[in-house]
Amino acid sequence: MKKKVVVLILMLYVCSILSGCIKIPIKLSINDKKGDSFKVEIDRNQKITSNFSGENSSVELKVREGFLCNVVNVDDIKDSDIKVTFDSMNFINNINVSDKLKKYVPNADEDLKKLSQAYSAFLGKSFKVKIAENGKVKKVMGIDELTMAVLKDLKDKSKEQDVKNFIKKEFSENALTAKIEKITLFYPEKRVSQNTQWRIRNTPSTKIPIQSVNEYVLKDSEDKTADISIKSEIKKNESAQPRNIGDVKLNFEDIKGNGSGNISVNLDKGIIKNTDIQSKYKGNIKIVSMDPNTGTQMIPITVEDKINVHVLNQ
């Protein structure tokens, strides 16, 4: 009799799983293999608005990037070495800086125009990244080689220093780590089932020193796809250091905001299929001038950021 009860319970459990009443906890992690390849398309729209001494300013950046990714190695602990090649780049900016603010960013519009014209030199160039199965970047490789290759193909040599500075700022190990982990650093430490929540702290930007605490919820895991929602609390990264620009020192203060979005993941490979994230935060830029006649200025800013990521298997 006891044996029959056990068999009956097992049969009911199996039937519940097959009918969808009970969801087996799943492991969410990167599970690619050597030789895998995929294309990553990223659309980003960031708008920064401010009011300085009664004058409004705004900077809107629209960036569309395409990268070809090839998995060149996966080691015993499932760290993946991925070769990342620039496939397409499109850069649009709309800058309206007030006369009073131009003192601190005098050539912002011209500098961005120069860089957008030089983007073609990046196409076909590559670097490598080592990424763990939990989405954490362990190492960025080949930036020096990338710099030399881009400068070699740069048609307008007068932009060489601008491009060097751009690569140093946008493609340093810290900058690339932040950019990649903004997309990949969401995998939970343990198996999760439907409606399970987990939290991960992230530093998604090196330009504006923010830190986010992201709360993820597994909404569904059917048809080999995991659907995940995300809510973020954004604040200042307290470990960030002030920046020196000419004879002024810039610091960010009182940053607060939030974000939300959705992530869908291919369960076979553990790689993102689509990501949509929106965020908005406010704060102040504190400008301390070496000129005693200028003193300290506070500039309130509002940042709105939207990012969409689409991954295609090749």
Image: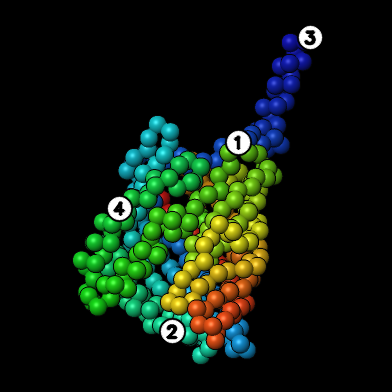
Q: Which residue is mark 2?
A: 106
- Marked residue nearer the N-terminal end (2 or 4): 2
3D distance between C-alphas at marks 1 and 3: 35 Å
The percent coordinates of residue 227 (x first, y second) are 60, 49
Gap between marks 2 and 1, in whole Å? 51 Å
Kind of residue sitting beneath label 1: Arg
Residue 167 location, quadrant: bottom left
What amino acid is labelled 4 in the image?
Answer: Gly
- Residue 292 picture location, percent across and down: 54, 83
- Which numbered disc, 1 or 4, marks the residue that appears first in the sequence? 4
Residue 251 appears at what percent x and percent y? 55, 69
Query: What's the amino acid at mark 2?
Result: Pro
Secondary structure at badge 3 equals loop
* Label 4 environment density (alpha carbons within 10 Å; few <14, some 14–19, many ≥20): few
Q: Which mark is residue 1?
A: 3
Q: Nearer the viewer, mark 4 or mark 3?
A: 4
Question: Depth-wise, is mark 2 or mark 3 nearer the camera?
Answer: 2
Q: CA distance from mark 4 to mark 3?
A: 68 Å
Q: Which residue is mark 1?
A: 191
Of callouts 2 and 3, the N-terminal one: 3
Amino acid type shown at disc 3: Met
Label 4 near label 2: C-beta < 8 Å? no
Which residue in the structure is indicated by mark 4? Answer: 142
